[in-house]
C-alpha cells in the first residue's frame, strides 16, 4: 500500500545513533530509511505477536473444541 500523505515529526536520537544513520544512508535518504526500518520492525513485531498467540492457543486444552464449534458454524454457513 502506498502512503500518499506524509506528516513531519520530530524525534530525538542519541548522537551516536544519528551519526551511524548518516553514515549508512545517502544524503536526502534519511526519512525513507527510517520509514523502511520502522515498517520492517512493525511487520516483524506483528508476526511475532501472531506466532505467540498461536503458541498460547496450542497450549489451551479447549482450543480443539472451540475450533470444532467454529467449523460446525462454517459448515452451516456454506451449506445454506
Image: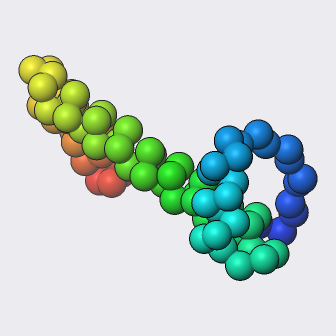
Asked whether residue 2 is in view, the answer is no
| Quarter of the image where one finds residue 57 | top left
User: Looking at the picture, does residue 31 appear above or below residue 13?
Assistant: below
Considering every residue shown, the one lying at the far bottom of the view is 26
Numbered disc total: 0
Decide which of 60, 80 is in the foreground and name it: 60
User: Looking at the picture, does residue 2 appear above or below residue 57?
Assistant: below
Q: In this view, does 32 lie to the left or right of 67?
A: right
Decide which of 43, 22 is in the foreground and name it: 22
Q: Where is residue 5 in the image (x, y as percent from the top left)?
A: 87, 63
Decide which of 6, 53 is in the foreground and name it: 6
Residue at the (64%, 62%) spot, across then down = 21
Decide which of 65, 25 is in the foreground and name it: 25
Quadrant including the N terminus: bottom right
Residue at the (43%, 52%) spot, across then down = 44
Q: Position of residue 8 (x, y in %)?
A: 90, 53
Q: Position of residue 70 (x, y in %)?
A: 26, 36
Residue at the (88%, 54%) spot, across then down = 7
Q: Is residue 42 left or right of residue 80?
A: right
Q: Is residue 62 left or right of residue 11?
A: left
Amino acid at each position: 500500500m502506498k502512503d500518499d500523505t506524509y506528516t513531519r515529526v520530530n524525534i530525538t536520537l542519541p548522537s551516536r545513533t544519528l551519526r551511524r544513520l548518516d553514515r549508512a544512508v545517502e544524503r536526502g535518504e534519511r526519512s525513507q530509511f527510517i520509514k523502511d526500518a520502522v515498517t520492517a520492525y512493525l511487520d516483524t513485531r506483528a508476526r511475532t505477536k501472531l506466532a505467540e498467540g498461536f503458541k498460547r492457543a496450542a497450549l489451551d486444552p479447549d482450543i480443539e473444541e472451540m475450533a470444532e464449534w467454529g467449523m460446525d458454524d462454517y459448515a452451516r454457513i456454506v451449506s445454506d
